[in-house]
Every structure is written in C-alpha cells, then in structure tokens.
Amino acid sequence: MNEDIFTEFAQGKLAVGNERIDLASLAWQAHPQFAGVSIKNLVTLAQTGGAFSCHLVKIEPGEAIGWHSHPASIELHEVVGGEGVCRTERGDISYLPGSMGIMEVGASHEIIAGSQGLCLFAKFVTKAT
C-alpha cells in the first residue's frame, strides 16, 4: 500500500482559526464497531460548530466497514492508498488511489479493503436544516 501522502497528512499541521494543531499528536483510534479499521480524527464537529468533520481511515487487508448510513450528513471518500470497493444500494464503486465517492444523506454503504488494505480521507458535511 502506498501511504506516502496519507502519512504526510497524518503527521502534518492543521490551522483552525488562530490555533495550530500538530496532527502527529492526534491518536489513531480503533473503530468502535469494525475490527481492522483505524481512524484519526483531524477535524471534529466541535471545531466547526457541527458543520463538518474530516478523518483519516485505515482499513487493514480484507477487513471492512460494514453496512451503515449517516442520517444527518453527506460523506465524501477520497482514496489515497491501497484498493477496495465501496458497495452502495446503487451499485459498487471501485476504490483505487484518486477515486472518490459521495454518499448522500442516509445512503447505506459498506467499504471493503482489498489485499493491500485501503487508506482514505472521509469527510462529513452536516445536512443544513
């Protein structure tokens, strides 16, 4: 898996207003529901007034983020390394570096890593009320 750019972001810097955050200081966390999935929360809803969040996601080879949906947000996946597939109710999306997928509000989907694992940015924009 080519994680060069993924690693750069994981160890980069984030500017939020006057605050500067060293992203290397943010911990990787095991996904609370799906084994073999790690998340680094780069931008949280708390930092953006509930409007937006951004996360690095690592899925180990052969592992998956099972079927789920986000009833209050649009989700954008940007594939940075590895390979896999995003299954949706409308069909499968091949995930290779440079691929992107947008999940509409409430759209069910699952993400399955291939033999190289999968690295992606997941960004969530909260639905306007």
Image (cartoon, rainbow, N blue to C red):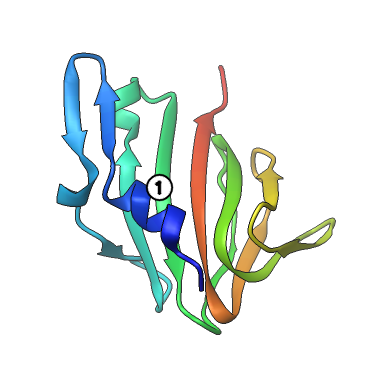
Residue at label 1? 55
Q: Position of residue 65 (x, y in %)?
A: 53, 68
**Left of 11 or right of it: where is 36?**
right
**Left of 45 or right of it: where is 111?**
right
Q: Amino acid at mark 1?
A: His
Q: Position of residue 61 (x, y in %)?
A: 51, 82
Number of callouts in the render? Answer: 1
**Left of 123 or right of it: where is 41?**
left
Q: Nearer the viewer, residue 105 or 52?
A: 52
Is 21 above or below relative to 34?
above
Determine the image quadrant of residue 52.
top left
Quadrant containing the C terminus in the rendered view: top right
Residue at 26% in and 62% down: 29
Residue at 18% in and 27% down: 20
Q: Dot 1 lies on which element?
A: strand
Residue at 42% in and 55% down: 6
Determine the image quadrant of residue 12.
top left
**Pointer 1: residues within 10 angstroms few (<14), some, or many (20+)?**
some
**Left of 105 or right of it: where is 59?**
left
Residue at 69% in and 48% down: 101
Q: Position of residue 63 (x, y in %)?
A: 51, 80
Q: Nearer the viewer, residue 116 or 85?
A: 116
